[in-house]
Amino acid sequence: MKCKVCGGKAVISLRAYNSALCEKDFISFLENRVFKTIKKYKLINDKDKLLIAVSGGKDSLSLWYILNKLGFNADGMYIDLGIGGYSDLSLEKVKKMSDMLKRPFYTFHLNDAMGKGIEAISKKIKRTTCSACGMIKRYIMNRVCLDKGYNVIVTGHNLDDEASALMGNLLYWKEEYLWKKGMMLNEEEGHLSKKIKPLFLCSEREMAAYAVLCGIDYIYDECPFSIGAKSLFYKELLNRLEDNSPGTKLQFLKGYLKFIRQMNIEKNRREMKYCINCGYPTVSDKCNFCRIMEKYGIERNIIFEEYRPTYEVFE
Ligand code: AMP
Ligand code: FES
Ligand code: ZN
């Protein structure tokens, strides 16, 4: 297999693009893809202060690395969900990247702040672990942005994450979520932070290859609570479609982006208030997070630990 650009030895075949690339050209291809996505969809403007949510996985760590390389300075944030060794190891990977990039990050420890890890909290509030986790992560990500003076949350959601979420929402016609699956959420302008997903058009396989080729040290394991999740099943189904017809996932998402643009959806602008407990923007008197935690008597002491990189030279 030869590289389509330079004729050298290809290390990866990209059937969706009818192409194969060598290490150097693949790295440029992927970085260029992220750059073009940011520019084409106007994800970042000059005044934006970026905070990237890093989980310790390949996508968010690679994205942090790429953003820095492209000159978009971003600090990080890590939410320690208190999942034993999995959370500790993830934090180590985030620290390593922070040191390498010389960019600080904030950590939120669920056990310290709320007296319990995600498993115990989800039981207490009678939700599945993933649903409790999603709700808490959304709140904490916005909260750290607001508290620390950032205005954009960057996440590492990739093409496979987005295609599987879209598929799930379509199958069950979850209309209220269907419109929220773009690569930029600017919903409550002036209240909540803007959320962007620059890896929207980069597949899981491409991201794994990028991380390995760039020597990015990431956590391989999935969260133990994601085993058996529907989203993983949808990913598998979509990969079978992709095997049969390369490019399907990309077309699915690109078509969706075009569709929501053409529909020019009028968002229901709701009048925003601020939570009487925590000051967080909400549509009622108390935000969802405070309401649920209060109902089930869970303490909340929202503090962020700041990690300053050690200025060592890394290989
Ligand atoms: P997931 O929902 O695990 O597929 O993660 C999607 C994105 O959410 C990741 O790429 C990160 O940007 C962010 N994220 C997930 N888990 C965490 C975490 N524990 N701390 C910070 N960001 C996270
Ligand atoms: Fe949320 Fe595992 S339960 S990442
Ligand atoms: Zn609140």
Image: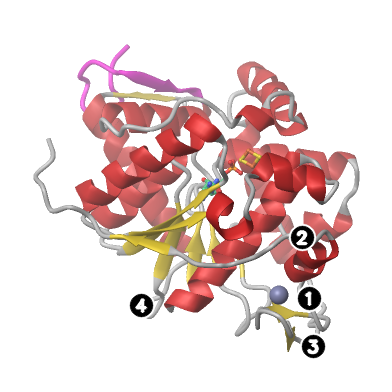
- CB of mark 2 within 8 Å of CB of mark 1? yes
Residue 46, labelled with which disc? 4
Closer to the camera in the image, 231 or 97: 97
Measured in 3D between alpha carbons, the distance from the residue under mark 2 to the one under mark 3, in whole angstroms, is: 19 Å
**SS at mark 1 in the image:** loop
Colouring of the image: secondary structure
Residue bearing mark 2: 179
Measured in 3D between alpha carbons, the distance from the residue under mark 2 to the one under mark 1, in whole angstroms, is: 9 Å
Quarter of the image containing the N terminus? top left
Residue 267, labelled with which disc? 1
Q: Residues within 10 Å of mark 2 (few under 14, many from 20)?
A: some
Percent position (x, y) of residue 272?
75, 86
| Lateral position of residue 81 relative to residue 295, left or right | left
Of the numbered discs 1 and 4, the one sitting upstream in the chain is: 4
Measured in 3D between alpha carbons, the distance from the residue under mark 1 to the one under mark 4, in whole angstroms, is: 26 Å
Q: Three-letter amino acid code at disc 4?
A: Asp
Q: Residues within 10 Å of mark 4 (few under 14, many from 20)?
A: few
Q: Which residues are magenta?
A: 1-15
Closer to the camera in the image, 139 or 249: 139
